Amino acid sequence: MTREESSKVTRRSIRLASSVTDENPEPKPSHPPTVADLTFGEESITLDALLSNFPGRRSQILDLIRLIGPLDSPSLPIMVYGDASTGKTSVALQVFRHLNRPFVYSSCRTCCSPRLLFESILNQLLLHSKCSSNGYASAKRCDKPSDFVNLLRQALSDVMETLGRKSMGKMLYLIVDHVDLIKDWDKGAMILQFLFSLYSVLKMPQLGIILISGLPPDVYYSNMGYTDPLPVYFPEYSEDELRQIFLKTQVNKKLYSAFLDVVLRPFCRVTRRVEELSTTFSSLFRKYCVPLDDLAISPNEDLKRRLYSNLKPHITSSLNEIFRVSSRPHDGDTKGERRQKASYSSENGEELEILDFHMSTSAKYLLIAAFLASRNPATLDASMFDSTGGMDNRKRKRKASEKSMEKKEIAEQEAVMKGPGSFPLERLLAIFQCIASVGDSSFGEEEEEEEATGYDKESNNMMSDILLQVSSLCDANFMIKSGSCPLEGSIRYRSMVSEDLCLKVARSLSFPLSKYLYRR
Amino acid sequence: MAPSTTIADPQPSSTTDSSNSNAAAAENDIRPFFVLHKASSGKKSTGTVRAKRRIDSPAPKLAKKSEIESTEVEDGEYFSTLRLKVFETVWSKIDKTIQDVLRDSHSKVFSGVHDWICESFESIRSCGALSLSEAVRSYPVLSQPSSKQLFTALVLTRNLEMVDDLLTFEDLGLHLKSQGCHVGKLSSMDFSTKNGVGGCLRGLLRQFVMPTVDVADVTILASWYRENGNHNNPVVIIVDDTERCSGSVLSELILILSEWAVKVPVFLIMGVSTAHDAPRKILSANALQRICATRFTLSSPAERMDAVLEAVFLKPCSGFTVSHKVALYMRSYFLSQDGTLTSFVKTLKIACLQHFSLEPLSIMLEHFCQDNQPPGEGTGLLTEATMKHAFDLPSVTRNKITRSTCEMLPQFLLDLQRMPKPWSIVVLCIYEAGKFDKIRLIDVFCETLDPEARYLKYFSPSASLNSQSHVSGRNSVIRRVLRKLRDFSPAQLSSLLKSWESLTAEFSEISDKVMELHPLMRNVEAAGQRPGLPSSPKKHASRSHSKLEKELKAMTDKVSAIIEFMLREYMKPVETVPFNEILCYKNVDKLQSALLGDPRGRIQSDLLESYNILHCMCCSQRGTSLLPSMHDTSILYTLAQEHADVINLHDWYQSFKTILIPRNSKAKLKSKTCSKSKKRKDRCEEPEPEQPAEASIQARFCRAVMELQIAGLIRMPSKRRPDYVQRVAFGS
């Protein structure tokens, strides 16, 4: 970790040093943005540096540069697409850094509505920055695509004029990132079409448009008569390319390459996203280095083997998880060192048995009742929950229906596909009352002491605020509600708890869940 | 009288006529447009009055209660205000204690969260500061892919219910704010699918930047963060009820914030009420991998409740205490009903309030909590009536204390004041012994309050002999403690001894006994150390092992003997002490009815006996028979009792109509054609209200059905059975 940070610091400091040269080290808030800010703002890099920065992206970079074309030549719209975390945005931005041409960047992730997208583009063109003095307002208010075209045309011609005066070329580029997100917007299809046809609508060859999308271009085309953008595909990285990417920033390359030998292959089978891999690898590498005193060591075969055997148990566990929670010692004496805890793997058996949060007894019974109502077919309720406890009845019934076994099997498979069944509130409450009373009677037998004091009103009290408990179970996502009008009374519920959790709850009540669960 | 009737007469008769004429046709179809007729304002007002009454119904009861008291006590008015005042002082004392306890229980986690924020913030800043233009421009800073990680704290509240922790997160926000962080709070309300991610961004901007922002733009946050030195402090966003949030919106917010994580270092604090993997269930995979989560655990509600219990009842606080039954009730209410500390505190407050409103002598509590004041001080307040009441108290008569021993009163009161101290020490000692077995303080508390002291029978030799077969008291905590003592390791014993020593330091009689244990403990330790020697031969080791066993046995026997001694000598349950009624609240039934209320049952019984509430002249004297003057909803509900769980709407309507238009008036209508004069005469004689029109009956019917539906008593017709409504019969 320290290694990575230090490498990051050095990289950043170089960039900082470079940026210091052309602008004030501490720009005042009133510092007016100029047209120069439309370029990347740092010294441009050479093509070689660009290519070496992005291993495995050589052809894409060259394609992109070719499509953007030489200085001052108009270009057709380009669409950069590929899976997440394949370097689309970084490559596009660095290409512009290399070309040192002015561009405007807007991400549809950040601008989550058409208005924000339009205004963000206009703000950058008009060199307007939001700050407290202008009340964080945009330069122009713009909601509709038609307004946007007019304002954009006007702003563009202004910018072009200044660009021409400063001899910074005759082209400006618009980069729109995360275009695929627009599909989910309100009226997203319309905005998408507008974006694709912007080039032909605007009729200004000075604006080059680059769309970055996670989805292939086929998804968007709809025969609307606009020129299709030129596609540039970013494929997933291969294992070798990933190795180069991860090795690039490391200080002790030999040690890290030994580490990658071990982890890269199994993880590549799961995911090839750099982002995902890098978070996993950074925590794994920390574990890998635990037995080492000297991190600058170059490992021999024997050491590699030892380190591998040390790491082995962690690999499989972190292969299966994308979300890990580290807990942190409260006393803080082991500062900085956090005990990583894989949520499933390192939990030992005993921990699984115990419910680690508090629920009131009636909420527990209600949870079990909901679980049963979702799993058991409603027709069996009567036989399950009669006074005798149900087991014998059920067996008889199953034998009787042996003829229709095949039919049943099909129905069962269907039920599995459908997932937990839904049930009305009445059924839930009826089952709740049955199992709570059963639980109570066994409870009462155990606690004769309590009964002797003449205090056993719990079963009556149980019912009082049960609807409140239902709603809090719904809030905790243990049950979900479906149905429209609450007055209609047709709300149906569905239990969302896993059998494990339900078993845990049942165990804490010492309730015989399996006795009531209908197994096919 | 005569002219007025003649003027008023023609109109109603004409309406009845007209309705009568097409009655045959209209009988069977309830014309839908009649439903649209507006109900008369008069009816509306009765409806609202009824509703108000229902809500206010506990109030008259309270008033009645105080009335009875005022007849008992001479100048009850004065005393009741005085008692209220004392209640306020006592409750404020309890309340403050509870607040302090809760704050203490959280402070550790709070400072932990703050340390974590500081550390992570430093690690972000150490990556290098961004220049202004770099920080506010729209494209991402290109650096390590891991820089998109969003630091997130999962604060586990360990309770399904959220109520307790709303305040906790409020406090956490204040704590972090006082440390200089920019704190914003979002609740599940902000994460609605309707408003999308824009809604919660807008909420955040309004909290951080300024209240008039109406554009949900993260760039505003970025430019704000770079102004006026804001960037010296981290931004903290608290989401207190993660489970209730819409997962897609929360995921989107996390994605957006993580894109900007380098420019605006945001720390997300998520309150998780169930298991720590709850985020896995609601967030999308993309959002999950952007989260760099750290877990913090708040103390569980049971632990918090034990702390509150200890501070309120076992440490000197207010003097107020509760009886065995009330304590049992509070425990079962906590365990089986609500499970929140809020409800526990509410129960306590209700008990306290009822104690002061029911017990005249409770005014003396004011002087109990002050140590330096002699308790006899309060006696000056007592009037003749209260004195009489005092000597009629069951605890007084049981102990055969009479008025003649009146001068002894201060002595009794002094005893009463001193009593709780050794008692609470004993309770805490037992709790300390049970801690290794995860015994809860509330269980110990409940068991030791038992006025019959049934726990003592576990010490009788017979009980220890056939303890296996002895069924009763299987759940006894003290028995469990005694059994567990045998399994204690020497280390546990010595730590138990240490804690006992510090607990009993002020109370010499018990602490002497505890001191006697020390030589035994030394023996045990000595015996325990010997087998640890490596040179010791095996035979010797086994012998010394048996010696250790013997010493341990002697030690545990002694410890259980001390527990027995403490229980016998000092564990005087508060209910056996004379004049305990001053301190102790006993009325468990009142407490229960105040807490539970049973609103659904109440609605139904009120509907069936609406005349009891409305107190109108016309219906009350006739008992149970239905009258047209009764409230429509009440009539309908009474009629519905005759049906099974499905009610035919038409039948129901017909029987409703027959109630509103009684049979004898129908007969009258038939005779109406014979002679008008006779009819008019009849009318004059009988001050019967004029017949309501068919339309208004239908409208009233619909209205009443609607009210029943809103009250949750019936369900509207389904598509399958359009003519039937269904009774929702739960809670009756």
Image (tube, rainbow, N blue to C red):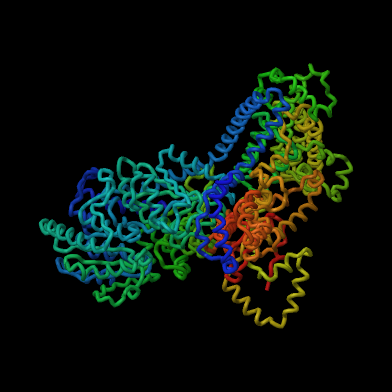
Q: Is residue B264 left or right of residue A326?
A: left
Give the residue furthest to the right.
B462
Q: From where the camera sits, is residue A44 visible?
A: yes
Residue occupying the point 16% across, 65% down: A206
Residue at figure coordinates x 75%, y 54% from the top left? A440
Q: Front-most of A95 and B643?
A: B643
- The picture quadrant where one finds residue B638 is bottom right
- Residue furthest to the left in view is A165
Q: Is residue B460 above or below residue A74?
A: above
Q: Position of residue A476 (x, y in %)?
A: 56, 55
Asked whether, in this view, residue A495 is left or right of residue A276, the answer is right
Q: Position of residue A5 (x, y in %)?
A: 38, 52
Nearer to me, A343 or B347:
B347
Q: Identify the image quadrant of the C terminus of chain A.
A: bottom right
Q: From the viewer's perspective, is residue B314 above or below residue A168?
A: above
Left or right of residue B650, residue B359 in this image: right
**Which percent across, then down, holds residue A109?**
35, 60
Number of marks drawn: 0
Residue B401, position as x, y percentages in the image: 83, 23
Does residue A465 show up? no
